[in-house]
Amino acid sequence: MSTLAVGLMYGGATLAIMASGMPIALALGTVAVIFMYFFMPGASLDTVTQNVYEEMASITLLAIPLFILKGAAIGKSKAGQDLYSAMHVWMSRIPGGLGIANVFACALFAAMAGSSPATCSAIGSAGIPEMRKRGYSGGFAAGVIAAGGTLGILLPPSITMILYAVAAEQSLGRLFLAGIGPGLLLVLLFAAYAMMRFKAEYRAALRAHAADPAEHPILAKEHFTMAMRFGSLPRVMPFIVLLSGVMIALYGGYATPSETAGLGGILALALIALIYGVWRPTDLAPILESTLKESTMLMLIIGMSLLYSYVMSYLHISQAAAQAIVGLQLSRWLLLAAILVLVVVLGFFLPPVSIILMTAPIMLPPLKAAGFDLIWFGVVMTIVMEMGLIHPPVGLNIFVIRNIAPDIPLRDVIWGTLPFVLLMAFAVVLLCLVPSISTWLPNLVMGLPSR
């Protein structure tokens, strides 16, 4: 049987089993084992566990459950609410300051937690009710939080970037640094849109309630004294110190990524014990349970995805697909556009973890042959996958928002997120035109990459 026929069967079987509703990890593992049975030597089935273990025996992957522990410790405490409150107090004088405060709070929390759903839940549970209480529309409030939460897979430490570094065999430290510039770019774009949207809603409310502005809460003025501003800092400064300490340990060469993740987890547990009194077994149980569940789910997906990729490589499906893409002789930018469109389509159905591990063997060789920097592409691909977190039909962050704000209609949530999808697409275009937005910082800190 030709490689093309086997590849079509492999892809068709994957889509069929996923469409049945089977969990992604089990679906990928099932397809891999079936094709090992029919198309690989019989002894291959005896080595399934060994193959999965060998593929996962990476010191880089050890950082994932440790970063999840750090994120769970922060997410299960009141750190998100305190961080949001401090941002709101400091930005109250800026038009749309409440929306901008949510964007910055999401960015800082995402950098500490490394998880988009955790960021949405932690900041949104406080931010959305406050925005609606002050007259912001439900769609605007939901869109700001959903989009801000996506920064969790771009700003370091990012679990998604850890997986990309493993799949692409690239430096994790360089990849983390490459995400900072684009992450700050998205923060500024989101903040600028929040200010413009606020002004539009403010003008509409002013026209509707010109006779009595007090009737609409968005027209009310809030005033905070300097004492109130500085009084909001003590509870959030330790977490800023935590973030700074982790980054210094990683980029200062004092610790490996896995050691840094362990350090971050221990410090996060220590901080919530000291600041919020979360130290009793009954307090720690939800944190450890959440860490165990998320880590197990994620590591199972990673293991099955790596087995899936191994079978695809053994059957020469990935190599043949890469050669076919190269054989099309597309211009390098058309090749990039076609691959990113594929990532967008896959984002309709799959989470970033599965997209990276399933497509890396096919996409990366042609891109490397076309002269693209794989670190730069990792950042671009991450932003495109961020778009998948806030656009239908899957849009994981959309459903997180629905859980914490069920009174906001799903239609309003979706329309509220679409402008942010366009802003992300604009950021991708900017990165294509000015790659140094992503590459200048890793080159500055770690030197030019070796060729």
Image (cartoon, rainbow, N blue to C red):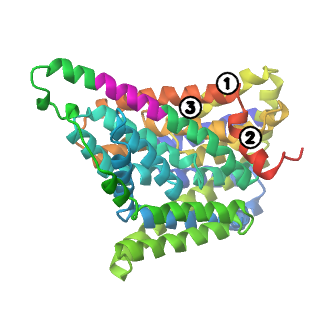
Element carrying mark 1: helix
Q: Is residue 166 visible in the rendered structure shown here? A: no
**Residue that mark 1 sits on:** 337
| Residue 189 x, y percent position in the rendering | 50, 31
Quadrant of the image for the C terminus?
Answer: top right
| Residue 448 x, y percent position in the rendering | 84, 45
Which region shows up in magenta? Answer: 190-201
Q: Residues within 10 Å of mark 3 (few under 14, many from 20)?
A: many
Circle 1 or circle 2, nearest the eye: 2
Amino acid bearing label 3: Val
**Residue that mark 2 sits on:** 440
Query: Label 2, label 3: how many angstroms apart (C-alpha)?
Result: 27 Å
Pick the front one: 206 or 182: 206
Q: Are marks 1 and 2 in contact (CB under 8 Å)?
A: no
Kindly indicate the quadrant of the structure image that contains residue 256. bottom right
Q: Is residue 115 above or below residue 416?
A: below
Which residue corresponds to the image point at 37% horizontal and 75% vertical from the top-left? Answer: 278
- Tag shown at residue 344: 3
